[in-house]
Image: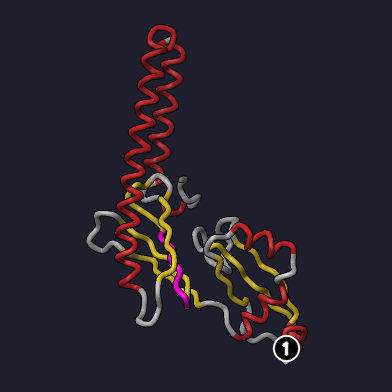
């Protein structure tokens, strides 16, 4: 389990950078003073213990995030939709912030969950399952090698058309909602595939 690569979500990025620099400086100081040659074995054992404790704490936080995310997902799901799957991902350097994604039979949702906060849910987005012109456009680009590779990786793929009034050419904008939204330049988990409107209209007929 790794953190989502979105540095923009950090609550205080300068504090995090300062901590990293302080830790690096301390390690360099220990190396210069040759502390490892005197207490190397104890450092190794202590490091392993810290890693195990960190994993246990992260596992506990993940279980809590999934439990709370399920409750929030039920509250966000409209009547008539049923939740099929759900995922919770930790945000970078923030153990209390989790990005949660869940899918129903009609749409895919994402929201930010803040553990231990009274207003625990924010940044909620909803993407309906492809239908009509969007569904036809997806069929048109389904044979594209880039589309196949992307959909083979994405766990929560969503799509939209860059131009709803398709006259000549538009783009099918794909994204894995775990990381980003379609039509945004943030992250590398999105894809724009051109589709010809005339071909799409011909297929519809």
User: How crowded is the residue under tag 1: few (<14 C-alpha within 10 Å), some, or many (20+)?
Assistant: some
- Give the percent coordinates (x, y) of residue 141: 71, 72
Residue 200: image quadrant is bottom right
Colour treatment of the image: secondary structure
Given the current orientation, which residue lies at the most extreme left position?
Answer: 118
Residue 190: image quadrant is bottom right
Relative vertical location of residue 63 with respect to residue 130 in this rendering, above or below: above
In the drawing, does residue 204 fall left or right of residue 153? right
Residue at x 66% of width, y 75% of height: 138
Residue at x 61% of width, y 68% of height: 174
- Give the percent coordinates (x, y) of residue 12: 37, 47
In the drawing, does residue 57 fall left or right of residue 136? left
Instruction: Let me know if residue 137 is in the magenta part.
Output: no
| Residue nearest the observer in this picture, 130 or 113 | 130
In magenta, the rendered stretch is 100-105
Residue 153: image quadrant is bottom right
Given the current orientation, which residue lies at the most extreme bottom position?
Answer: 205
| Residue nearest the observer in this picture, 96 or 150 | 150
Instruction: Let me know if residue 102 is in the magenta part.
Output: yes
Relative vertical location of residue 130 with respect to residue 8 in this rendering, above or below: below
In the drawing, does residue 157 fall left or right of residue 53? right
- Give the percent coordinates (x, y) of residue 127: 49, 74
Relative vertical location of residue 58 with respect to residue 150 in this rendering, above or below: above
In the drawing, does residue 118 fall left or right of residue 92? left
Considering the whole magenta stretch, tell me its main secondary structure.
strand
- Give the percent coordinates (x, y) of residue 73: 35, 68
Q: Which residue is mark 1?
A: 201
Q: Quadrant of the C terminus?
A: bottom right
**Mark 1: secondary structure:** helix
Residue at x 72% of width, y 76% of height: 140
């Amino acid at each position: 389990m790794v953190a989502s690569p979105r540095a923009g979500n950090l609550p205080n990025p300068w504090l995090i950078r300062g901590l990293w620099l302080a830790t690096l400086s301390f390690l360099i100081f220990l190396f210069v003073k040759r502390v490892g040659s005197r207490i190397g074995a104890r450092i190794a054992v202590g490091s392993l213990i810290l890693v195990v404790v960190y994993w246990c704490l992260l596992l506990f936080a993940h279980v809590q995030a999934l439990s709370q995310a399920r409750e929030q997902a039920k509250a966000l799901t409209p009547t008539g939709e049923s939740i099929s799957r759900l995922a919770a991902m930790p945000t970078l350097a923030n153990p209390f912030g989790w990005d949660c994604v869940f899918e129903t039979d009609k749409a895919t949702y994402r929201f930010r969950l803040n553990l231990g906060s009274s207003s625990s849910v924010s940044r909620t987005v909803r993407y309906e399952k492809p239908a009509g012109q969007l569904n036809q456009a997806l069929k048109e680009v389904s044979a594209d090698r880039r589309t196949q590779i992307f959909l083979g990786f994405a766990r929560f793929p969503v799509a939209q058309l860059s131009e709803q009034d398709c006259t000549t050419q538009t783009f099918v904008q794909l994204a894995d909602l775990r990381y980003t939204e379609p039509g945004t330049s943030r992250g590398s988990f999105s894809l724009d595939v051109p589709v010809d409107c005339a071909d799409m209209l011909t297929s519809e007929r």
